[in-house]
Amino acid sequence: MADKESPKKPIVNNSNNNSKKKKKKKRGGSKRKMTLEQTVAYKSVSEWVLLDRSNDNINNSMGVFDSVLDDFGVQCYQPKEKLVFEFHCHTTCSDGFLSPSKLVERAHQNGVKVLALTDHDTMSGIPEALEAARKFGIKIIPGVEVSTMFSARGESGPKEPVHILAYYSSCGPKNAEALEKFLCNIRDGRFIRAKNMISKLNKLKMPLKWENVIKIAGKGVAPGRLHVARAMLEAGHVENLKQAFNQYLYDGGPAYSMGSEPVSGEALELIRETGGIAVLAHPWALKNPATIIRRLKEAGLHGLEAYRSDGKLEVYSDIADAQNLLKLGGSDYHGRSGQHESEVGSVSLPVMVVHEFLKLARPIWCNAIKEILETYVKDPFDSNLQLITRFGRTKVSRGISPFKCTKEFIKQCLSTWLSKEERESTEFEAIKLELCHISIS
């Protein structure tokens, strides 16, 4: 008993604890050397992120690194800044709670360097996001989350909702009219779908007014399930949004309804034809992901989401590797401010993952930009001019011709998305020469 109460014992324990703390601090403070592959990937990714801020330091191979000594006194290199990418988020233009400008501001506060805006079935929020991004130095990837239906046995088989993320270049999609018509048809179906949901809820003794759902969605916004759920919450039919989905609006639920979503293969074909990168969103929500992913790969899928805020999902990473697909991920942020929602910019994507994405995407985007500019050079009409400027706002000052402003905008697009080698290629030099001829004429 006396031994247990001896004051020496706690002193020994404190000593051990302090020793452990010191060792832990020492380990945590050491610099970990990047592998050669990681160094090359980080340099390539960071140079693309900073293309619009290119200077001699960035062009210098060590401009994006700090030189440090590791625990053994060996010189190694560490990134000068953390590159945070956000590849999946929403605004008030679909079913988000923040406007595009407010979303960009929040992303900046969270250290995001590149943000892909991926509203459901619309790209209408991208111009506002681009305008806000200029103030914060954030790069915006024009994107969209396309609602589709997958059926393993064709039209006669059971259908399952599949969402596909599409990522485009600074000039947006080529043949943009075809994509907009495609998305417009989906949005029109959302109105019919929401009305059917309201009708089903009314039959379940939970009356809702169409006017309230439209008001919640906002002017010009196609209503989705979240807008119906918010109307249910406001009417007092549910205690929270989660309950609305879990009990009534889930896929196949008592108040669920389908719209006019196209088949997944058709959407994939159009995304590829318009110069986009197609990535499967939240595959963990699918009933039979392995089969669906294999079929989508055959139809033209480029990648799938395998990273979330809580880390890499090994099962989907393994599927991606087996199917030779890109691995990506995003927060799917809506701005609900709930404890169950991931914060914008909260997904830690390894630099190697982003590097692989850009290795595939950049040549596709480069070709799309070239085709869009060639279309304008061939037919320099206002309609083709709008295709170039629709994802960027050019301010036309008094006394300055719209063409001059357009040329400056085109120059900006090229400098922020294409490397010096790409911009000075034979194809782009010919396009710039043609633009000068148009200006003279």
Image (cartoon, rainbow, N blue to C red):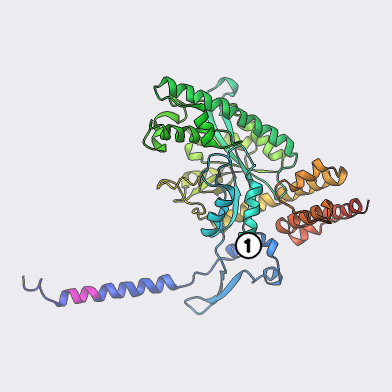
Whether 411 is drawn above or below 26: the answer is above
Secondary element under disc 1, as helix, strand or loop, is helix
What is the x, y in percent for residue 83?
57, 60
What is the x, y in percent for residue 232?
43, 32
Q: Residue at x 75, y 57 (%)?
A: 412
What is the x, y in percent for residue 231?
46, 33
Closer to the camera in the image, 303 or 74: 303
Closer to the camera in the image, 199 or 14: 199
Closer to the camera in the image, 225 or 232: 232
Whether 352 is drawn above or below 268: the answer is below
Count of numbered badges drawn on the protein: 1
Report the span colored magenta.
10-14
Q: Residue at x 52, y 43 (%)?
A: 96
Extreme residue in the left direction:
1
Q: Amino acid at mark 1?
A: Ser
What is the x, y in percent for residue 386?
77, 44
Residue 36 is a magenta residue: no
Q: Residue at x 47, y 29 (%)?
A: 251
Please say whether residue 338 is visible from this viewpoint: yes
Magenta segment's dominant SS is helix
Which quadrant: the N terminus?
Answer: bottom left
Q: Which residue is mark 1?
A: 46
Q: Residues within 10 Å of mark 1 (few under 14, many from 20)?
A: many
Closer to the camera in the image, 69 or 144: 144
Whether 167 is drawn above or below 84: the answer is above
Please say whether residue 159 is visible from this viewpoint: no
Q: Quadrant of residue 383?
A: top right
Extreme residue in the front direction:
398
User: Is 230 left, or right, of 154 in this rendering?
Assistant: left
Q: Quadrant of residue 12?
A: bottom left
